[in-house]
Amino acid sequence: LGSPLRACDKLNKACLALYNTALTDFGGQALASGLKCRALQHLDIRLFGTGVGDQTGLELAQSIRFCSSKLQTVFVGFGGTQAGDESGSAISASLGSCSRLIKADLQFPDTKISDAGGSRLAQGLARPEVKE
């Protein structure tokens, strides 16, 4: 699924939702890598209750950076996963590169993100142009 998405150079909206599946970092990285679409403006990725972790978060951060010139809205849901501070830091840093970002919703309940990772996530959103 990941690599065919990358071939869609005009894709401006992507929504991927996998709840309570056996998805691991191997598949999560492939999905996140497929989101490297320069025209992407709206990203919604929900991987609640899966086996993904920091490797998926790191790959997602790279994809967000790749799309940063157009990306306006982002929803990232990693609840009930193995995501930790490394994911939080990378995703936060990637959001900082999104010059057109006006809305971000990051949900990481029941993960391994500590206070330090949560603080870094908040820093990525501490921009006046992010409205919600």
Image: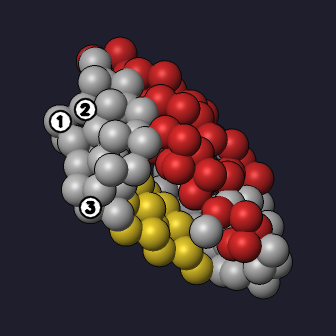
Q: Secondary structure at mark 1?
A: loop
The disc, 2 or 3, on the residue closer to the chain's N-terminal end is 3
Q: Quadrant of the C terminus?
A: bottom left
**Residue 4: image location, x then y, percent:** 72, 73
Task: Please tell me whether mark 3 sits on a helix, a strand or a loop.
Answer: loop
Q: Look at the numbered discs 2 and 3 and tell me whether their residues touch, using CB distance below 8 Å.
A: no
Label ID, residue 110: 1
Distance in Å between CA atoms under marks 2 and 3: 15 Å
Q: Specify which label sits upstream in the sequence, 3 or 1.
A: 3
Residue 12, located in which quarter of the rendered image? bottom right
Residue with the most extreme front position: 22
Q: Residues within 10 Å of mark 3 (few under 14, many from 20)?
A: some
As rendered, which of 102 and 2 lies closer to the eye?
A: 2
Q: Residue at x 69, y 72 (%)?
A: 5
Report the residue marked by disc 2: 111
Name the kind of residue labelled 1 in the image.
Asp
